[in-house]
Image (tube, rainbow, N blue to C red):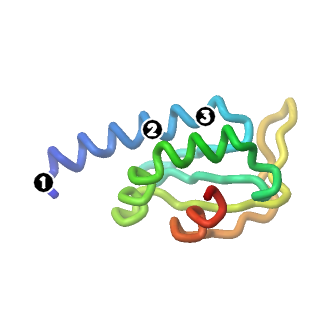
Amino acid sequence: MEISETLKYYHNFKATLLSLLPDKNIFVYFEEPIYYLILPDPERLTEEARENIRKYLSRIEEAEKCGMVKIYIDKELSYSSQGVKINNPKEIKVEELKRIIF
């Protein structure tokens, strides 16, 4: 991949993950140059959240190959007025993410 293609892809991926932010079941954290996609217990993942992830799965998959995204499941992920509390994240790969959302 050329540098210009990489930058274009990076910006497209950034837009993809930012579009997931309104979904309260998905937490996206950015620490340049890596995005962290943190999902709650799969049982708490709404159908809408699953559909949002499915929509962008190919981009998430490509970003994982490039080392631009890390995916976690945190069964104790919680939200409050103070923000998001990440308690016990477990890293997963896209293959496991596919099993969860399909």
x and y percentages locating residue 26 in the rendered image: 67, 44
- Quarter location, residue 10: top left
| Residue at the image position 76 percent from the left and 60 percent from the top | 74
Amino acid at the residue labelled 1: Glu
Indicate the position of residue 78 as horizontal and vertical percent values.
Answer: 84, 46
Picture residue at 16% right of the left edge, 58% below the top: 1
Asked whether disc 3 touches disc 2, contact meaning CB atoms under 8 Å apart, the reply is: no
Q: Earlier in the sequence, mark 1 or mark 2?
A: 1
Find residue 21 and name its label. 3
Q: Secondary structure at mark 3?
A: loop
In terms of secondary structure, where does tag 2 sit? helix
Question: Image height check: is 33 above or below 13?
Answer: below
Viewer-proximal residue among 26 and 79: 26
Disc number lying in front (1 or 2) = 2
Residue under the point 64% across and 29% down: 22
Task: Tell me the kind of residue under disc 3.
Answer: Leu
Q: Residues within 10 Å of mark 1 (few under 14, many from 20)?
A: few
Q: Left of 80 or right of it: where is 56?
A: left
| C-alpha gap between disc 3 and disc 1 | 29 Å
Residue 97: percent from left, percent from top: 59, 63
Location of mark 2 (residue): 16
Q: Amino acid at mark 2?
A: Thr
Name which residue lies at 81% across and 60% down: 75
Which quadrant would residue 81 be assigned to in this image? top right
Give x and y (percent) for residue 41.
Answer: 79, 58
Mark 3 or mark 2: whose residue is earlier in sequence:
2
Q: Residues within 10 Å of mark 2 (few under 14, many from 20)?
A: some
- Secondary structure state at the residue bearing disc 1: loop
The quadrant the C terminus occupies is bottom right
Give the residue at mark 1: 2
Q: Give how far apart the Cα atoms at labels 3 and 2 are.
A: 9 Å
- Find out whether the residues at labels 3 and 1 contact each other: C-beta distance under 8 Å: no
